[in-house]
Amino acid sequence: MTYRSELERLTTLTAEEVADACAGRRLSVLTTRCIDEVMELDALADEALADDDSEGHAYYHQEASAWRETAQLLRALTHASARGGAHGAA
């Protein structure tokens, strides 16, 4: 799979953000946003767990996982771009 298809599959970023990332634009900003989302969603998952809200916990945990995977893909794309080409970005 390509970076683009993987990022689209996760549905965490907008189409414009995916296009920017695949073009090597805004990678640092987008990665930081992902990390912020993960931290917020992890905190919400912890709160839900403390409140015995298993459905809320599962939801927030799943959302955090998607953002975490997005951050990993963006980091890989950043490294690929730095090496001179993001094969599979388009």
Image: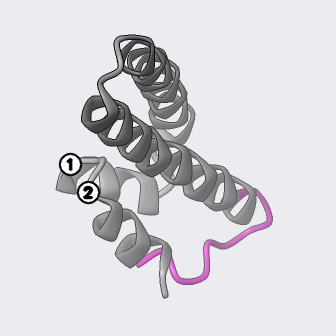
Q: Amino acid at mark 1?
A: Thr
Classify residue 76 as left or right of residue 64. right
Nearer to me, 26 or 33: 33
Identify the residue at image location x=42%, y=50%.
66
What colour scheme has been applied to the protein in the rendered image? one colour
Callout 1: few (<14), some (14-19), or many (20+) C-alpha neighbours within 10 Å?
Answer: few
Q: In the rendered view, tell whether residue 32 sits above or below residue 40.
A: below
Taking the spot 43% from the left edge, 21% from the top edge, the residue there is 49
Query: Residue drawn at (38%, 17%), measured in percent from left and top?
Result: 44
Q: Main secondary structure of the magenta part?
A: loop
Left or right? Give the position of 80 relative to 26: right
Residue 6's x, y, as percent? 42, 72
How far across and how far down the image is residue 46, in percent? 48, 18
Q: Which residue is mark 1?
A: 14
Is-magenta flag for residue 86?
Answer: yes
Q: Is residue 61 magenta?
A: no
Q: Residue at x 39, y 63 (%)?
A: 7
Q: What's the distance in space between the residues labelled 2 and 1, CA to CA? A: 7 Å
Q: Position of residue 86 (x, y in %)?
A: 61, 72
Near-viewer residue (66 or 28)? 66
Please tell me whether mark 2 sits on a helix, a strand or a loop.
loop
In the picture as drawn, the residue positioned furthest to the bottom comes out as 1
Residue 74, disc: none
Q: Quadrant of residue 55?
A: top left
On-image quarter of the C terminus: bottom left
In the rendered image of this protein, does residue 45 appear above or below residue 59? Answer: above
Residue linked to disc 2: 11
Which element carries disc 1, helix, strand or loop? Answer: loop
Q: Which residues are magenta?
A: 82-90
Q: Position of residue 48 (x, y in %)?
A: 35, 19
Amino acid type, callout 2: Thr
Comparing 37 with 46, the one in front is 46
